[in-house]
Image: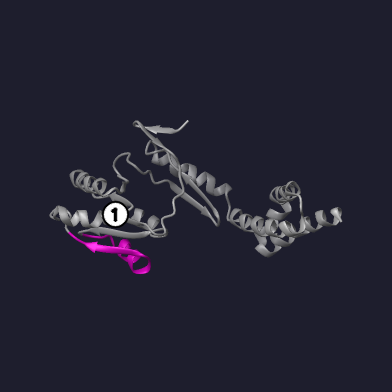
């Protein structure tokens, strides 16, 4: 069943933001947190009268662009200009009426909205990345503490070796396509590698050792077939 929050139905999705623009209004700690996340994925613009020092540091070392402006006195046309080509707009000021005004113009432009003070179009999850593995965690605002707690629990279990295993599985799968004709046999070998404790232990030492341990399993199956 779809997750419902205040009448909204949220579906977890992975979206390509490489050609998208994210506009954040507010240069405080919340704006910093949002910019730190989105700057890794999208063109990110932060508009505010003031910026915390960490946000200025982020802008000097990433794709974040800062625009200094008093939003309370900004004319409607200027706000409309900022959101006109945005994919996602994040009103993150500490003034509710200003956030309402920004949201109104964002919706007029067709942008998605992520309000930091209420449930909206988009809920930003807590993210764990391990190489090619990405995990998003959210309680949809019901318990930020639980989201953080869950992330910490998962991080102790999902080690960096999970990213290495994804890379290893991809490489071995390509090898198997040239050496093992039957798809069911290829699948069985990949699962054997995935469940082999010796391969995981080898990956903790180095990727090369993990690869060699996995390749030994492949060779053993090929020898049996031969």
Residue sitting at the far bottom: 60
- Residue 66 on the magenta span: yes
Q: Is residue 206 among the parts visible in the rendering?
A: no
Residue 154: % across, % down: 53, 45
* Region in magenta: 50-69
Residue 170: % across, % down: 64, 57
Q: Nearer the viewer, residue 44 or 225?
A: 225
Quarter of the figure that contains the C terminus:
bottom right
Residue at 76% over, 48% down: 185
Identify residue for label 1: 24
Q: Is residue 164 above or below residue 95?
A: below
Q: Nearer the viewer, residue 218 or 208?
A: 218
Q: Is residue 223 above or below residue 13?
A: below
Residue at 53% over, 49% down: 155
- Residue 94 on the magenta span: no
> Label 1's element?
strand
């Amino acid at each position: 069943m779809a997750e419902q929050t205040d009448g909204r139905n949220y579906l977890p999705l992975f979206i390509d933001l490489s050609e998208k623009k994210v506009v954040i209004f507010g240069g405080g700690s919340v704006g910093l947190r949002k910019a730190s996340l989105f700057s890794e994925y999208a063109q990110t613009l932060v508009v505010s009268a003031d910026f915390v020092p960490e946000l200025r540091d982020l802008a000097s070392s990433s794709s974040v662009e800062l625009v200094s402006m008093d939003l309370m006195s900004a004319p409607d046309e200027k706000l409309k200009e900022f959101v006109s080509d945005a994919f996602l707009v994040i009103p993150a000021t500490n003034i509710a009426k200003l956030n309402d005004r920004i949201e109104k113009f964002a919706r007029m432009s067709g942008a998605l909205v992520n309000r930091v003070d209420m449930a909206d179009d988009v809920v930003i999850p807590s993210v764990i990345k391990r190489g090619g593995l990405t995990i998003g965690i959210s309680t949809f605002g019901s318990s930020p503490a639980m989201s953080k707690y869950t992330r910490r629990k998962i991080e102790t279990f999902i080690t960096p070796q999970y990213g290495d295993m994804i890379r290893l599985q991809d490489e071995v799968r390509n090898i198997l396509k040239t050496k093992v004709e039957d798809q069911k046999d290829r699948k069985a070998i990949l699962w054997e590698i995935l469940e082999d404790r010796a391969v995981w232990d080898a990956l903790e030492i180095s990727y090369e050792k993990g690869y060699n341990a996995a390749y030994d399993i492949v060779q053993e199956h090929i020898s049996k077939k031969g």
